[in-house]
Amino acid sequence: MKTYDWVVIGSGIAGAALSYELSVAGFSVLLIEQHQHLQGATRYSYGGIPYWSGTTDLTRLLAQEGIDRYPKLAPELESDIEFKYIDLLLTIAANANPQAIADSFKHFAVQPQLLDPKLALTLEPLLNPEAISGVLHYHHAYVNPELLVKAYQLGLLRHGGEIVIDQVRQVNQIGVNSGVKTLQTSYYGQNIAVCAGGIGRSLLKSSGVSVKLYFTHAEVIETVPSEVILRTIVMPAITDRLRLESEASRNDQRWDDEDYEVLAPSIDVGAIQFKNQHLRIGQISLAHTNPYLDRDLQQSEIAIRDQVKNIIPAIATIPGTCHRCLVAFSADSLPLVGAVTENIHIFSGFTSPFVFVPPLAKRFALAIAGNSDQLINQLSPHRFSNFA
C-alpha cells in the first residue's frame, strides 16, 4: 500500500496550486481530480485578480503578495498563463448615486476612479450609456484560469508528483494516516487536503467533520468565439453574489437540510473576453444546500441574456452555452486554511481565489515544511467558536 505525504482532492486553482507548492517543498503528492478536462468554478470564472480589493491588513498583504507572485509564475511554471493588466469597469446603475457608490470603496487598498458614462465609453464602447450613471475604473489584472491550472499541474509532475482522474466519495481518518475512497479504489496519505470547492462540505461531513464552508450554484454563459471585441472586464459595482454569500452563511442550521433553498437566485451582469475570443457572460448565484441540484439552464440563459442586453447589448445575443458550477465561500469572507483533524486539512472558501490562492498555497507549504506562519494560523477553520 503506497502512502503519500499528501493526497490533494480537487484540481481547480486551489488544489492545483497547493499540490505544486507542496511538491516544491519536497513532499510526495498525489492530486486527485474528478474530470479529465477542467470543470467547476475555476473553469467558468473570469480569472480576475483584484489586487486592489484588500480591506484589512491581512487581505491587503495577501493581495499584494498575489499580484507580486504572478510575473514570476509564468517563467517558474514554464508556461504561458496569459497574465496581463486590463481595465476593469464596475458599472453603477442609472438610478444610483455615483459618488455614494464610489465612497463605499474608500476602505479598499486602492481607490477607483469615478467616470461618467461618456468617459466610460471611451474605454468600453459596447456599454449602453443610458443604463448606467457612471463606472468605477480600476487598473485590474487577470489570468487564463485553464492555462494557470494546467501550468500548475505540469509543474507538479516535473517535481515528481502524480495526478489521477477519479471521483472521491469519502475521506477517512485511519490511524496515523488518512484514506480517500474513490469510485475505482482507495488512496492513502499521511495528510489529506480537501480543495474540492463547494463539494468539500459534504466530503468533510463524510469524515464526521462540520466546517463553516458553504456554496452557491453559479450559472454562467460561455459564448462561441466572437468578432465583437470587448476591450475591458465589465462587472457591477454592487454585486448581488457577495450580498447573497453574506446572508446565506448566517444560519448554519439551514445547511443541515439536504434539499433547501437558502436564498433565491440573483443575477450579476458582467463579461470578459479571453484571447481565444470566447466570452463569459453574467452570473446567476443561488444558495441551495443540494450540490447536485438540477435546474433548467435554458431558463437561466434567458434570464442572464435579458439582463446583459441592458448593459452591454452587443454581446447579449452571441451564441453560447450556459454552464453551472459550485462556488465555495466561508462565513467571514476569508478562506479556510488548515487542519480540521490531525491529518485532514482544508484549503477552500476563497472569495477572490486568483489573488489569494497563489501566495497562500506557497505559505501553507512552507508552514507544513516547518516555517511557522502566523498568517496561516489566522485562517484556520478553528477560528469559528462552534467549529466541530
Image: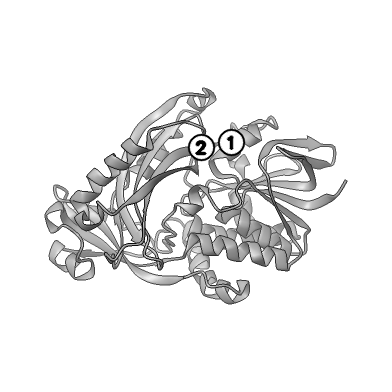
Tag 2's secondary structure?
Answer: strand
The residue carrying mark 1 is: 201
Q: Left or right: where does residue 51 sit relative to residue 136?
A: right
Task: Give the amino acid type for the residue marked by disc 1 in the picture.
Answer: Arg
Residue at the (67%, 31%) spot, across then down: 206
The spot of residue 338 in percent (x, y) is: 65, 48
Q: Which mark is residue 214?
A: 2
Residue 57 appears in the figure: no
Distance from label 2 to label 1 (Cα)?
7 Å
As drawn, the residue found furthest toward the right would be 1
The spot of residue 161 in percent (x, y) is: 74, 60
Of labels 2 and 1, earlier in sequence is 1
* Contact? badges 2 and 1 (CB < 8 Å): yes
Mark 2 surroundings within 10 Å by alpha-carbon count, few (fewer than 14), some (14 through 19), many (20 or more): many
Residue 175 appears in the figure: yes
Q: Is residue 386 above or below residue 380?
A: above
As drawn, the residue found furthest toward the bottom would be 75
Residue at the (47%, 70%) spot, across then down: 82
Q: Is residue 232 above or below residue 198?
A: below
Say which quarter of the image contains residue 295: top left
Residue at the (60%, 33%) spot, across then down: 202
Task: Give the amino acid type for the residue marked by disc 2 in the picture.
Answer: Tyr
Q: Quadrant of the C terminus?
A: top right
Q: Left or right: where does residue 329 sit relative to residue 275?
A: right
